[in-house]
Amino acid sequence: MRVISGTAKGRRLKSFPGRAVRPTADRVKEALFNILPRDLSGYRVLDLFAGTGNLTLEALSRGAEDACLIDQSQRAAKMIRANLLALGFSQRAQVRVMPVLRAIRTLAGGEKKFDLVFVDPPYDKGWVGRVLEAIAGEALLTENGVLILEHSTRETAQGRYGPLELRDQRCYGSTLLSFFGNVGLGLTAKGE
Protein backbone atom coordinates (compact mmCIF):
# COMPACT_ATOMS: atom_id res chain seq x y z
CA MET A 1 0.00 0.00 0.00
CA ARG A 2 1.10 3.51 -0.78
CA VAL A 3 -0.19 7.07 -0.81
CA ILE A 4 -1.10 7.90 -4.41
CA SER A 5 -1.24 11.71 -4.33
CA GLY A 6 -0.85 14.86 -2.28
CA THR A 7 1.89 15.84 0.14
CA ALA A 8 2.76 12.23 1.02
CA LYS A 9 2.59 10.91 -2.57
CA GLY A 10 4.53 7.70 -3.07
CA ARG A 11 5.07 7.00 0.63
CA ARG A 12 4.57 3.37 1.63
CA LEU A 13 2.11 2.50 4.39
CA LYS A 14 2.52 -0.17 7.02
CA SER A 15 -0.01 -2.97 6.75
CA PHE A 16 -0.93 -6.22 8.42
CA PRO A 17 0.55 -9.48 7.20
CA GLY A 18 -1.96 -12.12 6.15
CA ARG A 19 -5.68 -11.64 5.72
CA ALA A 20 -6.73 -10.44 9.19
CA VAL A 21 -7.44 -6.98 7.77
CA ARG A 22 -8.61 -6.33 4.19
CA PRO A 23 -7.21 -2.93 3.17
CA THR A 24 -8.74 -1.17 0.18
CA ALA A 25 -6.87 -2.33 -2.91
CA ASP A 26 -4.66 0.34 -4.53
CA ARG A 27 -6.66 0.22 -7.78
CA VAL A 28 -9.98 0.73 -5.93
CA LYS A 29 -8.46 3.53 -3.84
CA GLU A 30 -7.07 5.22 -6.95
CA ALA A 31 -10.46 5.00 -8.71
CA LEU A 32 -12.22 6.40 -5.62
CA PHE A 33 -9.86 9.35 -5.28
CA ASN A 34 -10.17 10.09 -9.00
CA ILE A 35 -13.91 10.61 -8.35
CA LEU A 36 -13.42 12.83 -5.28
CA PRO A 37 -12.04 16.38 -5.55
CA ARG A 38 -8.25 16.49 -5.81
CA ASP A 39 -8.01 19.15 -3.11
CA LEU A 40 -9.73 18.16 0.14
CA SER A 41 -8.62 21.24 2.07
CA GLY A 42 -10.96 21.99 4.95
CA TYR A 43 -12.68 18.61 4.85
CA ARG A 44 -13.46 16.76 8.07
CA VAL A 45 -13.16 13.01 7.60
CA LEU A 46 -14.69 10.09 9.48
CA ASP A 47 -13.35 6.59 8.82
CA LEU A 48 -15.41 3.70 10.23
CA PHE A 49 -13.82 0.23 10.31
CA ALA A 50 -10.57 2.09 9.60
CA GLY A 51 -8.21 -0.93 9.50
CA THR A 52 -4.84 0.52 8.46
CA GLY A 53 -6.28 4.01 7.88
CA ASN A 54 -5.42 3.74 4.17
CA LEU A 55 -8.31 5.92 2.87
CA THR A 56 -8.03 8.61 5.52
CA LEU A 57 -4.26 8.85 5.07
CA GLU A 58 -4.90 9.57 1.39
CA ALA A 59 -7.48 12.24 2.31
CA LEU A 60 -5.04 13.86 4.76
CA SER A 61 -2.34 13.82 2.09
CA ARG A 62 -4.80 15.74 -0.13
CA GLY A 63 -5.29 18.42 2.52
CA ALA A 64 -8.16 17.21 4.73
CA GLU A 65 -8.32 19.41 7.82
CA ASP A 66 -8.85 16.67 10.38
CA ALA A 67 -9.93 13.07 10.69
CA CYS A 68 -11.43 10.67 13.18
CA LEU A 69 -10.60 7.01 12.61
CA ILE A 70 -12.62 4.29 14.35
CA ASP A 71 -11.71 0.65 14.73
CA GLN A 72 -12.44 -1.74 17.57
CA SER A 73 -9.05 -3.43 17.27
CA GLN A 74 -6.13 -2.21 19.40
CA ARG A 75 -3.82 -3.76 16.81
CA ALA A 76 -5.42 -1.72 14.02
CA ALA A 77 -5.24 1.46 16.13
CA LYS A 78 -1.54 0.89 16.70
CA MET A 79 -0.97 0.46 12.94
CA ILE A 80 -2.99 3.61 12.15
CA ARG A 81 -1.03 5.65 14.70
CA ALA A 82 2.25 4.39 13.25
CA ASN A 83 1.16 5.40 9.74
CA LEU A 84 -0.06 8.82 10.94
CA LEU A 85 3.25 9.43 12.71
CA ALA A 86 5.35 8.27 9.75
CA LEU A 87 3.51 10.64 7.40
CA GLY A 88 3.44 13.58 9.83
CA PHE A 89 -0.36 13.63 10.16
CA SER A 90 -0.69 12.82 13.87
CA GLN A 91 -1.78 16.35 14.82
CA ARG A 92 -4.66 16.27 12.33
CA ALA A 93 -6.19 12.94 13.32
CA GLN A 94 -7.55 11.09 16.29
CA VAL A 95 -7.89 7.34 16.58
CA ARG A 96 -10.64 5.83 18.72
CA VAL A 97 -10.72 2.19 19.72
CA MET A 98 -14.37 1.19 20.10
CA PRO A 99 -17.17 -0.64 18.33
CA VAL A 100 -18.45 1.34 15.34
CA LEU A 101 -22.10 1.61 16.39
CA ARG A 102 -21.10 2.96 19.80
CA ALA A 103 -18.69 5.39 18.13
CA ILE A 104 -21.49 6.73 15.92
CA ARG A 105 -23.65 7.45 18.99
CA THR A 106 -20.69 9.03 20.81
CA LEU A 107 -19.78 11.27 17.88
CA ALA A 108 -23.39 12.41 17.48
CA GLY A 109 -23.40 13.53 21.11
CA GLY A 110 -20.54 15.90 20.31
CA GLU A 111 -22.50 17.55 17.49
CA LYS A 112 -19.58 17.17 15.07
CA LYS A 113 -20.43 16.60 11.41
CA PHE A 114 -18.21 15.26 8.65
CA ASP A 115 -17.74 16.22 4.99
CA LEU A 116 -16.40 12.83 3.98
CA VAL A 117 -17.32 9.52 5.62
CA PHE A 118 -15.63 6.25 4.69
CA VAL A 119 -17.43 3.06 5.71
CA ASP A 120 -15.56 -0.18 4.99
CA PRO A 121 -17.08 -2.96 7.12
CA PRO A 122 -16.08 -6.61 6.97
CA TYR A 123 -17.61 -8.10 3.83
CA ASP A 124 -20.78 -10.20 4.00
CA LYS A 125 -21.30 -9.83 7.76
CA GLY A 126 -24.57 -7.84 7.73
CA TRP A 127 -23.02 -4.46 8.59
CA VAL A 128 -24.15 -2.42 5.58
CA GLY A 129 -27.74 -1.63 6.62
CA ARG A 130 -27.00 -1.36 10.34
CA VAL A 131 -24.21 1.17 9.94
CA LEU A 132 -25.98 3.30 7.32
CA GLU A 133 -29.15 3.43 9.44
CA ALA A 134 -27.11 4.46 12.49
CA ILE A 135 -25.29 7.22 10.58
CA ALA A 136 -28.55 8.48 9.04
CA GLY A 137 -30.23 8.49 12.47
CA GLU A 138 -27.45 10.59 14.00
CA ALA A 139 -27.04 12.99 11.04
CA LEU A 140 -23.23 12.86 11.02
CA LEU A 141 -22.88 14.00 7.41
CA THR A 142 -22.68 17.71 6.59
CA GLU A 143 -25.27 19.14 4.22
CA ASN A 144 -23.07 18.65 1.12
CA GLY A 145 -21.06 15.77 2.54
CA VAL A 146 -20.41 12.44 0.85
CA LEU A 147 -20.48 8.99 2.42
CA ILE A 148 -18.62 6.25 0.56
CA LEU A 149 -19.48 2.68 1.44
CA GLU A 150 -17.06 -0.02 0.31
CA HIS A 151 -18.77 -3.39 0.29
CA SER A 152 -19.01 -6.75 -1.39
CA THR A 153 -21.02 -7.03 -4.61
CA ARG A 154 -22.99 -9.73 -2.78
CA GLU A 155 -24.34 -7.14 -0.32
CA THR A 156 -27.10 -4.76 -1.30
CA ALA A 157 -27.23 -1.15 -0.22
CA GLN A 158 -30.76 0.27 -0.31
CA GLY A 159 -31.49 3.47 -2.19
CA ARG A 160 -32.22 5.44 0.94
CA TYR A 161 -31.51 5.42 4.67
CA GLY A 162 -33.37 8.30 6.30
CA PRO A 163 -31.81 11.47 4.83
CA LEU A 164 -29.04 9.50 3.07
CA GLU A 165 -29.70 8.80 -0.59
CA LEU A 166 -27.72 6.51 -2.89
CA ARG A 167 -26.28 8.67 -5.69
CA ASP A 168 -23.86 6.42 -7.53
CA GLN A 169 -22.29 2.97 -7.50
CA ARG A 170 -19.07 1.75 -9.09
CA CYS A 171 -17.99 -1.89 -9.35
CA TYR A 172 -14.36 -3.05 -9.18
CA GLY A 173 -14.24 -6.85 -9.33
CA SER A 174 -15.97 -8.12 -6.18
CA THR A 175 -15.89 -4.65 -4.56
CA LEU A 176 -18.69 -2.13 -4.86
CA LEU A 177 -18.34 1.56 -3.97
CA SER A 178 -21.71 3.12 -3.09
CA PHE A 179 -21.86 6.92 -2.82
CA PHE A 180 -24.47 8.52 -0.55
CA GLY A 181 -25.45 12.14 -0.01
CA ASN A 182 -28.26 13.97 1.75
CA VAL A 183 -31.65 13.81 0.03
CA GLY A 184 -32.26 16.59 -2.47
CA LEU A 185 -28.61 17.60 -2.76
CA GLY A 186 -26.15 16.62 -5.46
CA LEU A 187 -22.75 15.11 -4.81
CA THR A 188 -20.57 18.19 -5.03
CA ALA A 189 -17.22 19.23 -3.74
CA LYS A 190 -17.37 21.19 -0.51
CA GLY A 191 -17.91 24.86 -1.10
CA GLU A 192 -19.25 24.55 -4.67
Image (cartoon, rainbow, N blue to C red):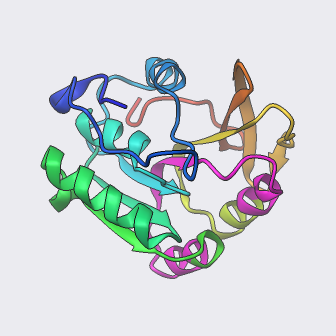
Q: Is 174 left, or right, of 47 in this rendering?
A: right
Left/right of residue 30 with respect to residue 48 in the rendered view:
left
Relative to 4, 136 lies left or right: right
Report the front residue among 28 and 46.
Answer: 28
Q: Nearer the viewer, residue 114 or 95?
A: 95
| Viewer-nearest residue: 8 or 174 | 174
154 w.r.t. 45: above or below: above
Identify whether 3 is placed above or below 64: above
- Point out residue 64 in the picture as x, y percentages from the top left corner: 29, 43
Q: Which residue occupies the extreme left position in the image?
A: 88
User: Image point 33% across, 65% down: which residue?
Assistant: 78
Q: Is residue 1 visible?
A: yes
Give the quarter of the image for residue 59: top left
Q: What is the quadrant of the N terminus in the image?
A: top left
- Residue 70 position within the rendered picture, expressed as x and y whole percent measured from the top left: 47, 65
Q: Quadrant of residue 55?
A: top left
Quadrant holding the C terminus: top left
Residue found at x 31% / y 44%: 14
Quarter assignment of residue 7: top left
Residue 63, visible in the rendered structure? no
Count of numbered circles on the image: 0
Q: Residue at x 71, y 19 (%)?
A: 173
Is-magenta flag for residue 85?
Answer: no
Pinpoint residue 162: horizontal percent, then vertical percent: 79, 57
Which of the two residues, 138 or 59, is positioned nearer the viewer here? Answer: 59
Q: Residue furthest front?
A: 18
Region rendered in magenta: 103-132
Q: Which residue is located at x 72 percent, y 49 percent? A: 164
Image location of residue 89, percent across then percent down: 18, 51
